Each structure stands twice: as structure tokens, then as C-alpha cells.
Image: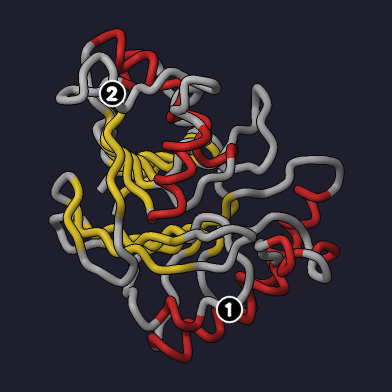
Amino acid sequence: MKIRILGAHGIDSRDTKFPSILIDDNMALDAGSLASGLSLREQRKVRAVLLSHSHLDHIQGIGALAMHFFTIGSTLEVYGIKDTINALSKHVFNKLIQPDFTQMPSPRRPAIRLHMLEVYKHQVVEDYGILAVPTFHSIPSVGYEVTAGNGKSLFYSGDTGPGLSNCWQYVDPDLIIIDCAGPNTYTPHAPGLGHLTPQLLEKEFMEFLDVKGYLPPIILVHMNPLGDDAVKIAEEISELSADLNTSIQLGYEGMEFYL
């Protein structure tokens, strides 16, 4: 399984992009930078997107790809829980924000096809095993365990605050890609906003270790790149990595690796 991080930050710019993770060039987890992080040729290889929730920084690329796929007569399969799919239907593809690409150029072959996923139900999407588990954000949100044909799997949290111990019972990942919005100075406010900090992550990872008996490598996304925050996150995560004796890295745009 080839994994490429297209966007790893909570603020969009030329150098820092909204969250999106590309798997084997053809399936994405979230779509914040799914268009801006890929060339037109690369965009055409994408067949499916799993959305964690409906906030703009996670769906932005869906709207951008809709016009491309409409123009070339292709279909992008978009998956999410009921709240996410309803938000796209009612508030994006509503002829006010965008044309209804779920019906264009024809209902039988639309540019965007929406699919509702059930939580805690193992499903197959584009030959990958998929499991959606609820997480803790300011709106209904899920994380995804994605399992490839070689048996390797990753867990992507999307945006989440603390309280993931229930999630850990359902997943057995070889890699965790997880939210870390800011340094420890964010800790008093992060849970209410549905995000994590290094201090909050420590408790989540200790609970994972208690439940599963191991800690896989970890990559962080959704970081704030402004001011001293990025430096502080790096310092605090380096300490946490040493304390837990496991690899914890800050994700970045263009980061590639294999499972």
C-alpha cells in the first residue's frame, strides 16, 4: 500500500494544504487538497474518496474534482456517513454552491456518486477493506481503518478530540495517522473544538497500548503552521516519541511511504 500525504495542515496556503491522504494513487482519505495537491493527470486516477466529515477543509477537493470529472465523462465515488453525505447533497451540490454534479451529465453516469457508509460495519471499497468508527469532533465524524490486500492496514482519525479508547477496540492498524491541531498550549480548548495536542495524544496512545498491547508508527496531520506553534509541536512530539518509545512523525505535503 503506497501512501502519499497531499495535505497535512489546518490552514491552506501555497506550502501548507488541507488534509488529504492518497492511497495507491486511486483512493483518498478526505479531500481538502485532493485537487490542489495533484496534477490533472493524477486526478484522473482517483476513483474513490472516503470523507471523515463535512467541514470545508476536508471536502474542498470534491467540488474541484466534480467539474473535472464532469468534463471528461468520469465518475468519482464519494463515501461518508449519513450526516456527511446529506451535507454534500443539501449544501454543496444544491445548484447554489455548485451544479448538481450527482445528476450530471446524467443520473446513470454522474460526475459525483454519493454513498452512505454504516459505522462499525466492515465493507469493501475499491478492493480495500474499510471500517468506519465514530470519533469526537464538533460535528458527526468518523475515522477509517483501511486494509489492503497484503493484510496491512492504517487507521486515519480525521479530526478528533480525546476519547478514542472505544475506537481502539475495533482496529488493529500497522500505522496511525491522527489529528494534532496545535501544541500543548491548545490543550484547555482543543477537546471542545474536537482536536488533539501532544499532551492529549499521550493519553490516547497509552490507552491504545493498554487495549492492543503494541503501538504502531504514528504520523500527525492537521497541524497549525503559524508562528511558533509548528516548532512547539515538533519539540513536544519529539519528547512524546521518546517517552513512548515509538516513531511519531509530523506529516508534511508530499510525504510518501509504503505499508
Give the total number of marks visible in the rendering: 2
Tag 2, which secondary structure?
A: loop
In the rendered view, does 246 fall on the left or right side of 211?
A: right
Badge 1 vs badge 2, beta-carbon distance below 8 Å:
no
Q: Earlier in the sequence, mark 1 or mark 2?
A: 2
Please tell me how crowded label 2 is: few (under 14), some (14-19), or many (20+) other residues with Cα within 10 Å: some
- Residue sitting at x 69%, y 37%: 11
In the rendered view, does 81 fall on the left or right side of 69?
A: right
Q: Is residue 107 above or below residue 177?
A: above
Q: Quadrant of residue 17?
A: top right
Q: Nearer the viewer, residue 96 or 221?
A: 96
Kind of residue at disc 2 = Gln
Inter-mark Cα distance, 1 to 2:
39 Å
Q: Position of residue 244 (x, y in %)?
A: 58, 79
What residue is shown with label 1? 163
Q: Nearer the viewer, mark 1 or mark 2?
A: 2
- Residue sitting at x 17%, y 63%: 151
Q: Is residue 108 above or below residue 127?
A: above
Tag 1, which secondary structure?
A: loop
Please tell me how crowded label 1 is: few (under 14), some (14-19), or many (20+) other residues with Cα within 10 Å: some
* Residue 73 image label: none
What residue is shown with label 2? 103
Q: Position of residue 158 (x, y in %)?
A: 51, 55
Q: Is residue 143 above or below residue 168?
A: above
Q: Position of residue 57 (x, y in %)?
A: 59, 39
In the rendered view, does 178 fall on the left or right side of 143?
A: right
- In the picture as drawn, the residue positioned furthest to the top comes out as 71
- Which quarter of the rendered picture does the C terminus lie within? bottom left
What sort of colour scheme is used for the picture? secondary structure
